Amino acid sequence: MCRNGQYTERGIKQIDGYASERWTVEASYAVKLDAALEDVGMLMEPTTVVAKAWEQVERVGARAWFEPTSVLVTGAGPIGLLAALLGRQRGLDVHVLDRVTEGPKPELVGDLGATYHHDDIDRVTDQVKPDIVIEATGVPGLVLGAMSGSGAYGITVLTGVSSGGHKWPVDTGQLNREIVLENDAVVGSVNANLRHYAQAAEALARADLEWLTRLVSRRVPLERFAEAFEAQDEDVKVVLTLDGRSG
């Protein structure tokens, strides 16, 4: 949320990442993970993204009486699945929308105790009438469906980043009318700060380790990094390993 853009972030902006044999970090910025999470520690950063998104939901909701019961997550990639995990940890009725009909994604959603959908977003929002929508794809049609599909006093958090150049027909007047008259809120959310890392560490420590392990569908050694970018049907999250492990 830096307004002038003069921030740095390892591996993202101006500072190299951590793929080196030795590195140091300021102790005040280090967040300790539960030792049991050693093999899934790379899930920490994407979890911070959704930890921040959920924090924003709760802060915006606090402007008035707010007791949400349902959430729709669009996208069943790592961000979407982790958003669903944090929704279930909050005791909400969680629904996840993705285009695939079989494979690990529907199974992972079901094992969370959430409901998986692969239908048109308008049909799903009409059915669920979610109090909260977390959009994790950046697909223009889903973004618009998320913004217009929440229930009254709904909160939509956009975490997916769209590419430019796409045109999509939209009834702007109707969308504006719905957002204003229903007191809806649409919030963009990206990245995280120290407290979100702490929140992510706590959420991962509370999660089922076997479920988290299944999010990592492939491990590719760094020397074969190009393989990680070759999409496979069963992929959820593909990670590069620095110790030569694969699988």
Image: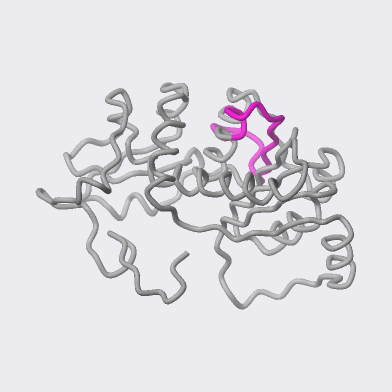
Q: How is the image coloured?
A: one colour
Q: For this rendering, which residue is in front, 196 or 169?
A: 196
Task: Indicate left or right for 179 with 142 as reference.
Answer: right
Which residue is rendered at x = 84% and y = 72% of the image?
Answer: 172
Q: For this rendering, which residue is in front, 70 or 113?
A: 70
Query: In the rendered view, would you say 9 is above or below 30?
Result: below
Query: In the rendered view, would you say 10 is above or below 74?
Result: below
Point out residue 94 in the picture as x, y percentages from the top left corner: 68, 33
Give the quadrant of the C terminus: top left
Point out residue 9 in the picture as x, y percentages from the top left corner: 31, 62
Q: For this rendering, which residue is in front, 158 or 39?
A: 158
Point out residue 214 in the picture as x, y percentages from the top left corner: 44, 29
Q: For this rendering, which residue is in front, 108 or 160?
A: 160
Task: Indicate left or right for 222 with 167 as reference.
Answer: left
Which residue is rendered at x = 45% and y = 34% of the image?
Answer: 215
Q: Which residues are magenta?
A: 87-107
